[in-house]
Image (spheres, grey):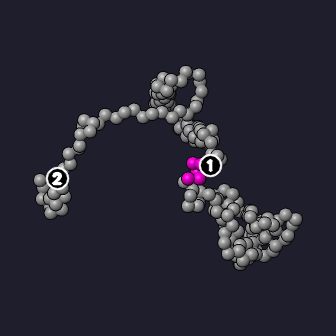
Amino acid sequence: MKVVQNVAFESFVLYTISKYGSLNSSWEVSVDNEMTKFNCSCFRMDSFGISCEHIVCVLVFLNILELPKSLVLIRWSKNAKTSTFNSSDITWDSIILSQYGCLMDWCRQLSYIASRRQERFHLLRDTVMSLIEDFNKIEDEQKKQVGVEADGSDDIFLKNPQNCRSKCHPGEKVKQKPQHTMWYLSHGRAQ
């Protein structure tokens, strides 16, 4: 890869990149004047969030020794997990919409397959109707537990988990198995 041409405009510089052997395949990388924003015609940075070799070629051409912060997205940094939960970019609405889209696509495929045969259709119909009834019952029970009137809202509620019954009495220590069990197993002897 090498920079074949660079053209300066008012607010950015456009670099044309091509492979050494062929001039027919070329890519264009635009860099703003502050060297903070890089865009490539292959759109790898835009779609995957990973810098492409064309942008790296321009960085080498410009003799930039450290990657600009705009090329390292937060999801690839060390504190990616903490920033994901604190970011306001992802909202519950966007998560619900993406889940809805996935379910609609899968149901569309399932409907296409099931509609071709009568027995598949009846099986899918019965299964879906059963799931709908089960989910409605679960939602009704959750609304009663939380104390929310059935107003048709689809809000996400945080609930307290139910208390789990333990096998021993509260405060009683659990008896442990003898430690010599591993010795019997390691020496090939059964108890």
Whether residue 126 is visible, yes or no, is no
Query: In the image, residue 172 lies at what x, y percent?
Result: 23, 40
Query: In the image, residue 138 lies at what x, y percent?
Result: 46, 27
Specify whether residue 122 is painted magenta. Answer: no
Secondary structure under tag 2 reads loop
Mark pair 1, 2: CA separation: 50 Å
Report the residue that reaches farthest toward the front: 171
**Where is mark 2, residue-wise?**
178
Residue range corresponding to the magenta coloring: 82-87
Q: Is residue 179 left or right of residue 11?
A: left
Depth check, front residue: 39 or 106? 39
Whether residue 40 is visible, yes or no, is yes
Q: Amino acid at mark 2?
A: Pro
Query: Picture quarter containing residue 156?
Result: top right
Q: Is residue 127 left or right of residue 77?
A: left
Note whether 44 is above or below 95 in the view shown.
below
- Mark 2 is surrounded, within 10 Å at the Cα level, by few (under 14), some (14 to 19) or many (20 or more) other residues, namely few
Q: Is residue 191 left or right of residue 174?
A: left
Depth check, front residue: 8 or 143? 143
- Mark 1 is surrounded, within 10 Å at the Cα level, by few (under 14), some (14 to 19) or many (20 or more) other residues, namely few
**Where is mark 1, residue-wise?**
87
Image point 18% across, 55% down: which residue?
179
Q: Earlier in the sequence, mark 1 or mark 2?
A: 1
Query: Picture quarter containing residue 105?
Result: top right
Query: In the image, residue 17 lies at what x, y percent?
Result: 75, 72
Q: Amino acid at mark 1?
A: Ser
Image point 66% across, 72% down: which residue?
66
Query: Picture quarter containing residue 152?
Result: top right
- Which quarter shows the N terminus? bottom right
Query: In the image, residue 116 lies at what x, y percent?
Result: 53, 35
Note whether 97 is above or below 5 in the view shown.
above
